[in-house]
Image (cartoon, grey):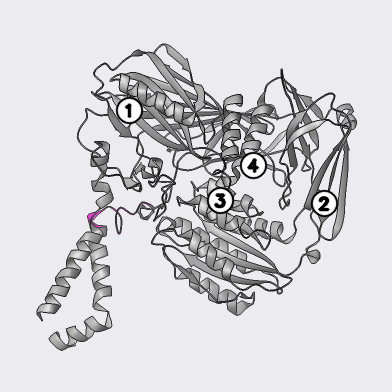
Amino acid sequence: MKKYKRFLCFFGVLLMVMMFPAPSARAEEENNGDGDKTGAPYFYVETDDTSVDSFPLKKTSVTADINGMIADIHVVQSYANEGKKPINACYVFPASTKVTVHGMQMQIGNQLITAKIKEKEEAEEEFEEAKEEGKSASLLSEERPNVFTMNVANIMPGDKVSIDLHYTELITPTDGTYQFVYPTVVGPRYIGEIIDDSGTREEWASTPYLPQGKTSKDVYDVRVNLSAAVPITELKSGSHEIAVQWDGNTKAGVSLADSSDYAGNRDFILDYKMTGQDISTGLMLNKGEGENFFMLMVQPPERCNIEEIPPREYIFVLDISGSMCGYPLDTAKELIKNLVSDLRDTDTFNLILFSGASEQMSERSVPANAQNIKKAIQLIDNQEGSGGTELAPALQDAIAIPSEKNVSRSVVVITDGYIYGEKEIFEIINDNIGDTDFFSFGIGRGVNRYLIEGIAKTGQGEPFVVTEKDDASETAERFKTYIQSPVLTDIAVDFSGFDVYDVEPSVVPTLFAKRPIVLLGKWRGEPTGTVQITGKTGNSDYKQTISLADLTSSGEVVTLESNVLSYLWAQKRMERLTDYGLNDEEPDVKEEVTQLGLKYSMLTPYTSFIAVTETVRNPEKDSTDVDQPLPLPLEVSNFAVGGYLFGSEPTELLLAAVVLLMIFTQLPCVKRRLRRRFGN
């Protein structure tokens, strides 16, 4: 009996430990600089201390000027210190993986300082030195291609600081639809046991988060000025309510319709089409002082017939971790049901569910018949979402499934992407390309697009993002169209009579989506000669020859005065060199990427923007470090952070205790002991 009581006592203590919100409790310690940072996200705990402004970021204003398919974007972050003590602020924020960040200005009062691009280590040292001296400074660094950190030092009480970031992005259409995406929030990253090369986790991953449903105190504003040479059609946003002001039918101003609806907890997505469904072929040129740049856009062929495609095997890898709980997992269920319910009779499939561990439907892939599809759907319906996000072991399990000869294999990853170790995922995929194509579906309003796009690009597939449950069926249809009938494979590009060099991409991957082939590069002499595109569509050979003289005479050559093409080219070159982290250990790669950043004044993994005031503004050197709390992405639950077992409310904790006690009392050994002691 004593042993049994001790066991129950141990269980009670264990239950209390599991329910205790440890990550939240350490928030105050970390804000004071006394905590031992573990690198994990945690819930922010607001205090009654008004002397320190814990929410110094007051407003983010995004203005995007889109001319056809080139977006010029300014992001203004407005900080203010409404507390009584000087502060140093750190803010983690996202961007599209496709943008080039090539300018930054900092304004404090009447002082306007243009930031300088420097090597990352040098910029960080200069920032820390300015911080210690009591000077106001700002430092913009890249943590991931889609995650940036802004550090601002010595914001004095009453200060208002404005930081203007300048982006450029190329927007390419898919099936005639252009999509501009501006990510607004970085979702929490599940870290597990992964550490970086220095033996510690990167500090940006330990971001404080507001609990689910907690309204952020900053204001988020997005405005888009869209201009085209032809009439614009089907202008819409599936993410936000928008107001549109038209100027004729070729220009439109887009703004948020409801300023009270917080816009900073989900990606801003704007879709538009232009008159004519066909993608035109065209050439853009820029003559610079030392270099000339070009961008050539080539219309792809039609898709091949589905009969020409061999039998396919689909392995679906579905994320059922805590961050997928609720809306994301419900949407994923709808998506995967649509994907498996309409496979061809010659197709086979399998299903792997993963969180902290993984569960596999079958040892080998099974025929796509009604019985197996029903089994898969039942397995999915039993999932609720809990645990960590261990994608790497699940991918290894998928690759280890025995394959059949003459069957084309595709691994389809469905996740919100809230993990930290993306590089490990890309390495696994890179080691297995050739045998398998990898596709990715991002589920949610603020997915990790770096992971979603990286899986597809590294795995020679296509990325898809589903933000609404109602879109799952449509997205599934798009996926099946793309994967069953690729547009063009084995693509080669040859220039004749046009003296070009440093062309990006150097190798054109398989073209699944009906989107243009875009080539960026440098040129000498005169833009004459021809460009020939060859490849295969299904079982047929394909060849297209483009005369630059014909493009010039038909008005399809545009000469640009700005140096926007140099930024777009440098971004493409950097993407290829870094290759989603697969080559970042190579000294030559690091050196070339660093020089790209310094030469073209752009943010890279190895270069940062730094701005420092000349005067000492905080002679007492008594500033307090503040990490700006982030809202959870819309419809992402507290499980994504893991600070609580069942959320943050006492009633939820009580429910957790009841559920665990019910489970405990149903264990066979416990039931037998209880019956012997108390009867039935």
The amino acid on which the numbered mark 2 sits, given as a three-letter code, is Gly
| Numbered tag placed on residue 88 in the rendering | 1
Disc 4 to disc 2, how far (Cα)?
A: 22 Å
Q: In the displayed structure, would residue 648 be above or below residue 285?
A: below
* x and y, in percent, of residue 494 in the image: 84, 41
Q: In the displayed structure, would residue 257 be above or below residue 12?
A: above
The amino acid on which the numbered mark 1 sits, given as a three-letter code, is Asn
Between disc 1 and disc 4, the foreground one is 4
* x and y, in percent, of residue 22 in the image: 25, 52
| Numbered tag placed on residue 452 in the rendering | 3
The single residue placed furthest to the left in the displayed view is: 2
Mark 1 nearby-residue class (10 Å; few <14, some 14–19, many ≥20): many
Between disc 2 and disc 3, the foreground one is 2
The amino acid on which the numbered mark 3 sits, given as a three-letter code, is Ile
**Nearest to the observer: residue 541 or residue 53:** 541
Mark 4 nearby-residue class (10 Å; few <14, some 14–19, many ≥20): some
Q: State yes or no: residue 650 in magenta.
A: yes
Disc 2 to disc 3, how far (Cα)?
A: 27 Å
Q: Main secondary structure of the magenta part?
A: loop
Counting residues from the start of the chain, the first of labels 1 and 2 encountered is 1
Mark 2 nearby-residue class (10 Å; few <14, some 14–19, many ≥20): some
Disc 4 to disc 3, how far (Cα)?
A: 17 Å
Q: Which residue is mark 2?
A: 535
The amino acid on which the numbered mark 4 sits, given as a three-letter code, is Arg
Q: Residue at x 40, y 15 (%)?
A: 613
Q: Residue at x 23, y 41 (%)?
A: 29
Q: Quadrant of residue 403?
A: bottom right
Counting residues from the start of the chain, the first of labels 2 and 3 encountered is 3
**Nearest to the observer: residue 370 or residue 667:** 667
